[in-house]
């Protein structure tokens, strides 16, 4: 089909979705209450945040990395890392604004870790 690496990514995503669907159906038989409405709401919010991330990555590829072949290696690395950083910040920002509970937990853990890092005394020389 000529998909190259895109085919690998697509098949990996398809396997993950199939795995999720099967596990959901099996768990629903056993548990009966899986808070499906809350799960669908969370998935919709994640899809929106993921769409913002994808749009930023597409824009970066379309405009900033359009001349990838002709750019110096260091320029490629800097541009790629900048796009990844902006997309990640946008994803987490949108997800936090949409009040995705799991990301509140991730943000709290990150704050705690960064707080510990900032409080470490400087090493003696």
Image (tube, rainbow, N blue to C red):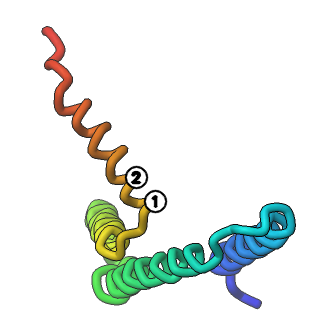
| Helix, strand or loop at mark 1 | helix
Say if residue 76 shows up in the picture. Answer: no
Quarter that holds the N terminus: bottom right
Left or right side of 3 for 80: left
- Give whichever of 42, 81 is nearer the camera: 42
Q: Which residue is mark 2?
A: 105
Quadrant position of the C terminus in the picture: top left
| Residue 9 percent location from the top left of the image | 65, 74
* Residue 43 image offset from top left, x and y in percent: 54, 77
* Residue behind mark 1: 102
**27 displayed left or right of 105:** right
Question: Is 5 positioned to the left or the right of 15 in the image?
Answer: left
Residue 105 visible in this rendered orientation of the protein: yes
Residue at 40 percent across and 52 percent down: it is: 106
Q: Is residue 55 above or below residue 23?
A: below
Q: Is residue 117 left or right of residue 6?
A: left
Q: Against 10, is 75 above or below? A: above
- Bin the neighbour count of mark 2 within 10 Å (Cα to Cα): few under 14, some 14-19, many 20 and up: few
């Amino acid at each position: 089909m000529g998909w190259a690496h895109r085919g690998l990514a697509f098949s990996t995503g398809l396997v993950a979705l199939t795995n999720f669907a099967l596990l959901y159906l099996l768990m629903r038989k056993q548990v009966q209450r899986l808070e499906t409405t809350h799960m669908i709401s969370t998935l919709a919010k994640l899809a929106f945040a993921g769409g913002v991330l994808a749009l930023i990555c597409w824009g970066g590829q379309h405009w900033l990395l359009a001349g990838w072949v002709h750019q110096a290696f260091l320029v490629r690395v800097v541009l790629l890392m900048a796009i990844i950083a902006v997309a990640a910040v946008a994803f987490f920002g949108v997800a936090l604004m949409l009040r995705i509970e799991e990301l509140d937990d991730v943000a709290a853990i990150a704050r705690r870790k960064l707080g510990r890092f900032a409080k470490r005394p400087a090493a003696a020389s």
